[in-house]
Amino acid sequence: MKRQNISSGAVWEDIVGYSRAVRVGNTIEVAGTTATNGDEVVGKGNPYEQAKYALQKIEKALAQAGASLSNVVRTRIYVTNISQWEEVGRAHGEFFKSIKPASTMVEVSALINPDLLVEIEATAILYADEKLINENATPYDEV
C-alpha cells in the first residue's frame, strides 16, 4: 500500500520525526494537534478556542489526505484540566455533532507548552461505498 505523509510545516515535525497526518490505504491517522500557529499559542487560557483551533487544523490535514470530518471514526482528547471538559466538549460537538465518532478525553499532567490546554488526535477511514457492513444492525448488534 502507498503511504502519504501530510505535513503542517510545524518546526517540530523534522526535529521529532513525525507527520501531521499519515494516510495508508483508506486509513488516515492525524497526530496530536494543538492550538499553535508557528510559535504562537492561539486562544491562551481558553480551552474552547484551543480545541476549536486544533479541530480546524485536523480538518485541514484530513482534506490534504482526501478526507473530511465525516470520515473520522475516532478522536482522542488530552486536556490539562479535566474540569474544563465541557468547554472542550462543546468545541468537539460543534465539529462532530452529527458524525459522532468514538471519543476519549483524559487529563494529562502537561503538554509540550505550558500555555497549551488541549491536544486532539483523530483517525479517519475512507469508504469505497457508504453502506454499512450489516445494514440491519442495531447499535448493539455485532457487525
Image (cartoon, grey):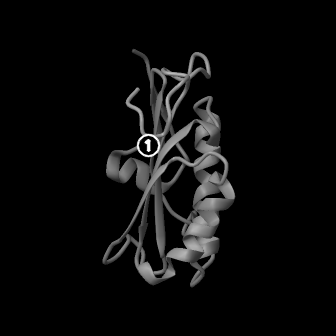
Residue at position x 56%, y 68% from top? Answer: 89
Above or below residue 12? Residue 113 is below
Above or below residue 6? Residue 24 is above
Q: Nearer the viewer, residue 30 or 86?
A: 86
Q: Residue 75: where, in percent of width, then height?
A: 47, 51
Residue at position x 46%, y 64% from top? Answer: 119
Residue at position x 59%, y 39% from top? Answer: 62
Q: Quadrant of residue 111?
A: bottom left
Q: Residue 103: where, in percent of width, then height?
A: 45, 54
Q: Nearer the viewer, residue 42 or 127?
A: 127
Q: Examine the rendering and report whether any part of residue 53 can be seen.
A: no
Above or below residue 7? Residue 116 is below
Residue at position x 60%, y 56% from top? Answer: 55
| Residue count near mark 1 (Cα–Cα under 10 Å), binned few <14, some 14–19, many ≥20 | many
Secondary element under disc 1, as helix, strand or loop, is loop
- Kind of residue at badge 1: Ser
Left or right of residue 42, residue 141 in this image: left
Above or below residue 34? Residue 108 is below
Left or right of residue 86, residue 143 in this image: left
